Image (cartoon, rainbow, N blue to C red):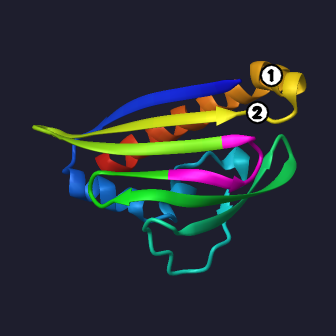
Amino acid sequence: MKYRIERSTFIPRPREEVFSFFADAHNLERITPAFLHFHILTPDPIGMKSGTLIDYKLRLHGLPVRWRTLIEEFVPGVSFTDVQVSGPYRFWRHRHEFKELATGTRMDDRVEYEMPFGFLGILTHRFLVRSMLDKVFDHRNASISAYFRG
């Protein structure tokens, strides 16, 4: 079963500035909630472009997890898409789009994902995963807003 998360965030800054923030992979650590203990393992410099692989480690409900993503598509200033190569999901694709508006930038996130483990994955999603992902994206949006305000 495929699931989807869609979020839009308005950032009162020019698109180039906003995109530049997200094109720096290390800023993902800055906007990820502390309860995930998220760290990038890929050594610097990380050149964001189509084909870039990025390795992370984190903790999900106390369990250590390694995650590798591939930057599947990278259009400077406009969008990029990362897909899970290995990690906790059966499938994960996260598209980030940046749209210039008169007073700033609208950032749209669209995540499509599938859980592993069949029926057990469906139950885990219902009782744990979806609420955790909502918390992650709520925290992320609050962190982004705070960063660009300050």
Secondary element under disc 2, as helix, strand or loop, is loop
Q: What residue lies at 51% left-to-right and 67% top-to-bottom? A: 51
Report whether residue 150 is seen.
no
Label 2 crowd bin: few (<14), some (14–19), many (20+), radius 10 Å: many
Mark 1: which amino acid?
Ile
Question: Residue 98 occupies which quadrant of the picture?
Answer: top left
- Which kind of residue does numbered mark 2 sit on? Met
Which residue lies under the disc numbered 2?
Answer: 115
* Vertical arrangement, residue 14 with respect to residue 25, above or below: above
Going 67% across and 62% down the picture, which residue do you hit?
Answer: 39
Residue 131, position in %: x, y?
A: 68, 24
- Return the disc, 2 or 1, that comes first in the chain's sequence: 2
Figure check: 123 above or below 28: above
Q: Is the C-beta separation of discs 2 and 1 under 8 Å?
A: yes
Q: Position of residue 52 (x, y in %)?
A: 52, 69
Residue numbers of the magenta segment: 82-91
Q: Is residue 145 visible?
A: yes
Q: Secondary structure at mark 1?
A: helix
Where is residue 23 drawn, in percent x and y?
Answer: 40, 62
Label 2, label 1: how far apart the Cα atoms are:
7 Å
Residue occupied by mark 1: 122
Image side of residue 75 versus residue 27, left or right: left
